[in-house]
Image (spheres, rainbow, N blue to C red):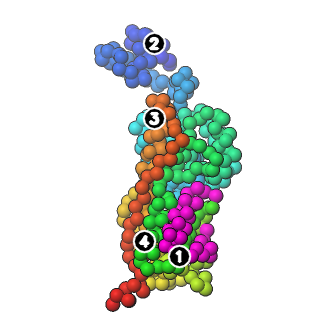
Amino acid sequence: MNIKTVAEYAGVSIATVSNVVHGKKIVKASTREKVLKAIHDLNYTPNAIAQSLKARKTNTIGVVISDISNPFFSTIIRGIEDASKESGYNVILCNTDEDYIKENEYLEVLKRKQIDGIILSATGRNENLKKLKKLQIPVVYIDRIPEEIDGPLVTSDNEKISYEATQHLIAQGFRKIGIIIGSKIISTTKERLNGYIKCLQEHGIPIHEEYIAVGDSRITGGKKAMEALYKLEDRPEAVFVTNSLMTLGALDYLKSENIRYSNDVSIIGYQDQDWEADWTLITNPAITVVKQPTYQIGWKAAHQLLKHITEGEELQSKRYELPCKLIIRESTQNPRAKKESM
């Protein structure tokens, strides 16, 4: 079965059938009905592969992220899928596990699939991306972008919100403030650490290297980092944990050791899901969190890429920073300040 058979059955030209299949509005309503009836009667299905080769488009984009099990990325994917569906595009998803070798392999796969564009959360190594640039596949970066790479980036206001979170702890009367960060080679980590350091410096608070713990953006890493901070001889009074998985790990350690927050240590975490009640349901007292615009990051990235693909709008080397929100709850109350006010 081919398009010629449908055209003969409907008594129209092949071009008319093609226009109907592609949804073009230049066909009269009566003629369109004849073609649609022929397609139904003959059970005709257009050959998507042949169409894509002819149009040099596959109506598919690739999305390369580090870990779909991370709530941050799973929510971003939802935004990408919704925006892609609106434009009639499909999504191929790839997980790198922060492994630049896997990243390279997936980029090669997507190239062979002749996808129309890529949304990429890079591992931090730019060897693969320099190669990708030569292929002339349009790319929009999400969350982070390697150094020396130009391109559109959709992310959150990492440095600004980190400054704000640290400032909130200072306003509560804390001076010994620790931070748990992700991988040091990732731009997001650097930005959040910069916000923390900048805020302490501007308030005249010394930077203690032992208060900066690396949790590698994992639950186990967050748990080990919180343990390391809490076991310091001069331990922090408050800790800022800079992603949601590490927040779970930090809370797990505190629970396992019967350490009470905010009585024994105050804590700020991250919340990446789009439903508001998650931390209030599983924490007592409820913890103060940074709420990221994760869905919006995905939607914005896909929207920028698809406008380039479908409308020819130029992709600019521009940084789109979407605002985070600090949601203040009981976990950052200073018990010392409470006693002093009594």
Name the residue that disc number 1 marks.
Answer: 205
Please name the amino acid that badge 4 sits on.
His
Q: Is residue 4 left or right of residue 232?
A: left
Label located before the other in sequence (4 or 3): 4
Q: Residues within 10 Å of mark 1 (few under 14, many from 20)?
A: some
Tell me the mark number nearer the camera, choosing from 1 and 4.
Answer: 1
Q: CA distance from mark 1 to mark 2?
A: 75 Å
Identify the disc placed on residue 168: 4
Name the residue that disc number 3 marks.
Answer: 307
Asked whether residue 175 appears in the rendered view, the answer is yes
Q: CA distance from mark 4 to mark 2?
A: 67 Å
Please name the amino acid that badge 3 sits on.
Lys
Q: Range of the magenta residues?
A: 185-214
x and y percentages locating residue 271 in the rendered image: 44, 63
Q: Residue 186: say if magenta.
A: yes
x and y percentages locating residue 302 in the rendered image: 47, 42
Tell me the mark number nearer the camera, choosing from 4 and 2.
Answer: 4
Q: CA distance from mark 3 to mark 1?
A: 46 Å
Does the residue at mark 3 contact the one at mark 1 (Cβ under 8 Å)? no
Q: Secondary structure at mark 2?
A: helix
Label located before the other in sequence (1 or 4): 4
**309 or 279, which lies in front?**
309
